[in-house]
Image: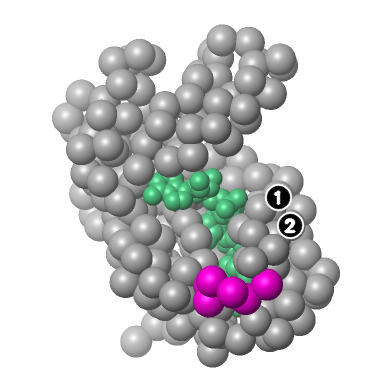
Amino acid sequence: MQLVIIADIDAAKGTSTTSELATEYADNVTFIECDVTNQESVEDTLGKAKDTYGRLDIISNNAGAMMENDPIGTINLNLCGVIRVAAVAMSYMRADKGGSGGIIINTASLTGVKPSYNCPAYCASKSGVIGFTRSFAMNPDFDLHKVRMNCLCPGMVDTPMIQGVLDEDGKEGRVLNFDRFRYAANLPQLKPSAVADVFIDLVENESKNGAAMLITVEGPPRDIEFPIY
Ligand SMILES: NC(=O)C1=CN([C@@H]2O[C@H](COP(=O)(O)OP(=O)(O)OC[C@H]3O[C@@H](n4cnc5c(N)ncnc54)[C@H](O)[C@@H]3O)[C@@H](O)[C@H]2O)C=CC1
Ligand SMILES: CCC(=O)/C=C/C=C\C[C@@H](O)/C=C/C=C/C=C\[C@@H](O)CCCC(=O)O
């Protein structure tokens, strides 16, 4: 039986999402409030998950935001948060330390490989997520710990993050050029389900360890090919 824990800093949104899912998945979905920028919060959350369900198999490292008005905070959330959750999760997942192996899927972005003057700190954070993912997956210790790692690199996706930036009408400075963002936000967008489909394929396809998956409206999802030096 698959059991799911939703962890988020936004307790209102997390509990409402869990309630919605509970209509279909009953008690198999629970919510734990978590701040991925806080080590103790991450340790408490993943510790509760392990204590509740006995094992961790699949981690979606998805927390992130666009905050060019807080570039260091952007790195702290989007990159350090991913690294922190992965490190704590590994301590429970690694097969050579009592775990069952599994997969950690980090959410990067198209902007991790396609720079944009509009959000340099965001781009840097997502480039870092890609580099962390690919470096982690290259480790020969995989044969011991059996935890795969991948990242998702979507283009624009129709989610509250985009609408939130639009609603602020540039007043918060989440991007450097709001008109440019408004232009980008009016381009064709992916549906969240398109990203979820790639997530599921990575869980099921054990041959893609380390792949960074490009997901855009221009064509089917594909592994990003990086130069070899
Ligand atoms: N919407 C888009 O066009 C794209 C989004 N992404 C990435 O997808 C991921 C999900 O974002 P979206 O669903 O688009 O936006 P979203 O704003 O709906 O979701 C982000 C979630 O992260 C949570 N969060 C923020 N700070 C947190 C913290 N300190 N600890 C725990 N949770 C925290 C928020 O409460 C929110 O539920 C992010 O990493 C984002 O950078 C990547 C490519 C495109
Ligand atoms: C691209 C920077 C921006 O203003 C909007 C960012 C919005 C969402 C978050 C990010 O993870 C996804 C970006 C996807 C961009 C897709 C296409 C862009 O190339 C459109 C052109 C915008 C630009 O280059 O400034």
Point out the stretch of residues depicted in magenta: 169-174
| Colouring scheme, one of rainbow, by chain, secondary structure, one colour | one colour
Q: Amino acid at mark 2?
A: Asp
Disc 2 or disc 1, which is closer to the eye?
A: 2
Please give the label number shown on residue 228. none
How many residues crowd mark 1 within 10 Å: few (<14), some (14–19), many (20+)? few
- The residue under label 2 is 158
The reply to whether the residue tagged 1 has its Cβ within 8 angstroms of ligand 1 is: yes
Q: Is residue 222 visible?
A: no
Q: For residue 100, what is the image quadrant?
A: top left
Residue 63 placed where, x, y %?
A: 46, 50
Q: Is residue 40 visible?
A: yes
The reply to whether the residue tagged 2 has its Cβ within 8 angstroms of ligand 1 is: yes
Tell me: residue 66, above or below residue 205. Answer: below
Specify the farthest residue to the left: 97
Q: CA distance from mark 2 to mark 1?
A: 7 Å
Circle 2 SS class: loop
Q: For residue 73, what is the image quadrant?
A: bottom left
- Placement of the C terminus among the 4 image quadrants: bottom left
Q: Amino acid at mark 1?
A: Pro
Name the residue: 38% across, 15% down. Answer: 53
- Placement of the N terminus among the 4 image quadrants: top right
Left or right of 205, for residue 95 = left
- The residue under label 1 is 192
Q: Main secondary structure of the magenta part?
A: loop
Residue 135 placed where, x, y %?
A: 31, 64
